[in-house]
Amino acid sequence: MTSDVDLCVSIVVHWSREVLDGRGYGDYQSMGLSGGQYGILREVVDAGRAALRKGTATREGVGLLMRRQARERCAARYRDGRPTEGPWR
């Protein structure tokens, strides 16, 4: 069974690459994201774009940066349970 964090990371990483490459489409719902996951996606893509603009990372390095940031942000989002559990209520 895939954990909520792993699922979040997987979908955010997938769409962050698509968006960074100009292939993202529609709104967050058409991407299969929740509003919170979409917020994470936007932050991750912004960090990737900034690293590319500065020239501080290769394309591969940007991918690793976005994966690491997605993992950190998704772990923080789900640390206390799903949106219908724990402090999310």
Image: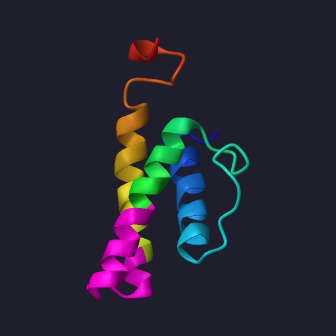
Q: How many numbered circles does the render carry?
A: 0
Query: Residue 19 location in percent, x, y?
Result: 58, 68
Q: In which quarter of the image is residue 22?
A: bottom right
Query: Can you say whether 47 is above or below 39 in the image?
Result: below
Majority secondary structure of magenta residues: helix
Query: Residue 14 location in percent, x, y?
Result: 60, 63
Q: Nearer the viewer, residue 6 or 37?
A: 37
Q: Give me the residue at 49% from left, 54% from top.
A: 41
Q: Give me the residue at 49% from left, 37% from top.
A: 36
Q: Can residue 65 be seen in this view?
A: no
Task: Please identify the residue farthest to the front as the structure is shown.
Answer: 26
Q: Quadrant of the N terminus?
A: top right
Q: Give me the residue at 42% from left, 14% from top.
A: 86
Q: In which quarter of the image is residue 46?
A: bottom left
Q: Give the range drawn in magenta.
A: 45-62
Query: Can you say whether 77 is above or below 39 in the image?
Result: above
Residue 59 lies in the magenta-colored region: yes
Query: Residue 51 location in percent, x, y?
Result: 31, 77
Q: Can residue 8 be seen in this view?
A: yes
Q: Which of 28 and 84 is in front in this view?
A: 28
Left or right of residue 86: residue 13: right
Query: Can you say whether 53 is above or below 14 in the image?
Result: below
Task: Please identify the residue farthest to the top as the structure is shown.
Answer: 89
Residue 23 lies in the magenta-colored region: no
Query: Can you say whether 79 is above or below 37 in the image?
Result: above
